[in-house]
């Protein structure tokens, strides 16, 4: 496969809501086209927002009415999949010629999911991944995905898979995705910490694949006009840290911190063969006689209706 450009778009959700956020995303179309990128990864919960510091009126054993109101506002800022926002992103993918992997808050019924969407030029929305395990208090507001949304998508840049933020730390999820033949690991996140760069380098080196991680960037609570308990008012709420990593764990671009931007790097998936010469976690370096992993990819519907 010829070399290609991959990119991480580092921006943040607008406090004004999903409509403004979508317009901000679309405003990058010209720069994405000029970059020649065949893949653009965008941050976790970019459409829908990541309400860092919000407690949704919850204490152990009880919930306050204002928390229900806060959740309702958050729910209405989430998106339908498919919907108007995915249609607009599909047009963007076609105009730029770039595959898009974007983190969104997806609503289904009255439940929200933190999801990655795969959007292809000319084809539009082709797949989604729902975060398997929301972290800590994220479980108050997001449901859990199941094994039916663990896609690997064939794209111009290579075979794309996605894990969102801390589910990247789940070894069995990584192993399952390696078994599906991922070549470019797309990691939307809001984890700004330096240790995240270590995780991305480890995963690239372990899976012998390219990693593109896109993180949100958000100004300080003071700049946003909000209060976040125990958070310095002048400290950025999310400071970025988007990064692109090679199959041997070397940083190709980034980390980008403290500002918006389009991070790019040239990659070639033909390099994966050489990278896997001495380590292939689901091939010659595996021991299926000792360890095997069974993955249930069936959708887990709560209610099943059986007809004669």
Image (cartoon, rainbow, N blue to C red):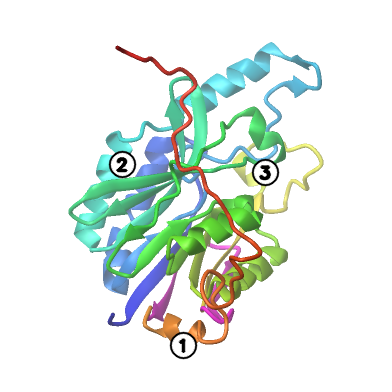
Circle nearer the N terminus (2, 3): 2
Circle nearer the N terminus (3, 1): 3
Classify residue 255 as left or right of residue 116: right
Q: Nearer the viewer, residue 296 or 87?
A: 296
- Quarter of the figure that contains the N terminus: bottom left
Q: Residue at x 42, y 37 (%)?
A: 18
Q: Residue at x 62, y 40 (%)?
A: 134
Q: In this view, does 277 lie above or below 23?
A: below
Q: Closer to us: mark 2 or mark 3?
A: 2
The kind of secondary structure element at disc 3 is helix
Rendered location of residue 224, percent (x, y): 60, 42
Question: Marks 3 and 2: in contact by CB < 8 Å?
Answer: no
- Quarter of the figure that contains the C terminus: top left
Mark identifier at residue 86: 2
Classify residue 234 as left or right of residue 200: right
Residue 286 magenta-drawn?
no
Count of residue discs: 3
Q: Is residue 96 above or below residue 306?
A: below
| Residue on which disc 1 sits | 274
Question: Marks 2 and 1: in contact by CB < 8 Å?
Answer: no
Count neighbours of disc 2 (C-alpha within 10 A) and say few if under 14, some if 14 to 19, many if 20 or more. Answer: some
Classify residue 154 as left or right of residue 167: left
Q: Give the range drawn in magenta.
A: 247-268
Mark identifier at residue 221: 3
Cα gap from disc 1 to disc 2, whole angstroms = 37 Å
Circle nearer the N terminus (1, 2): 2
Rendered location of residue 234, percent (x, y): 72, 51
Asked whether the viewer can see residue 117, the reply is yes
Q: Is residue 127 above or below residue 250?
A: above
The kind of secondary structure element at disc 1 is helix
């Amino acid at each position: 496969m010829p070399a290609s450009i991959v990119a991480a778009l580092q921006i943040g959700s607008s406090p004004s809501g999903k409509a403004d956020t979508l317009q901000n995303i679309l405003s990058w179309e010209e720069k994405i086209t000029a970059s020649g990128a065949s893949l653009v990864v965008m941050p976790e919960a970019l459409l829908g927002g990541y309400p860092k510091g919000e407690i949704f009126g919850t204490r152990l054993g009880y919930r306050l009415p204002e928390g229900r109101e806060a959740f309702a506002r958050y729910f209405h800022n989430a998106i339908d999949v498919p919907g108007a926002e995915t249609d607009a992103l599909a047009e963007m993918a076609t105009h730029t010629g770039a595959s898009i992997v974007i983190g969104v808050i997806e609503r289904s019924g009255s439940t929200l999911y933190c999801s990655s969407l795969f959007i292809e030029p000319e084809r539009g929305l082709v797949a989604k991944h729902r975060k398997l395990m929301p972290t800590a208090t994220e479980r108050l507001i997001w449901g859990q995905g199941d094994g039916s949304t663990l896609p690997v998508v064939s794209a111009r840049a290579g075979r794309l898979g996605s894990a969102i933020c801390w589910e990247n730390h789940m070894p069995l999820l990584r192993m399952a995705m390696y078994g599906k033949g991922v070549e470019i690991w797309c990691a939307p996140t809001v984890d700004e910490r330096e240790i995240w760069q270590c995780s991305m380098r480890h995963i690239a080196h372990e899976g012998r694949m390219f990693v593109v991680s896109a993180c949100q960037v958000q100004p300080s609570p003071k700049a946003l006009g909000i209060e976040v308990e125990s958070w310095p008012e002048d400290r950025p709420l999310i400071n970025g840290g988007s990064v692109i990593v090679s199959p041997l764990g070397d940083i190709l671009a980034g980390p980008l911190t403290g500002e918006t931007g389009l991070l790019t790097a040239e990659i070639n998936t033909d390099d994966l063969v050489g990278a896997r010469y001495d380590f292939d976690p689901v091939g010659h370096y595996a021991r299926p006689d000792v360890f095997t992993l069974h993955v249930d990819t069936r959708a887990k519907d709560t209610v099943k209706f059986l007809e004669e």
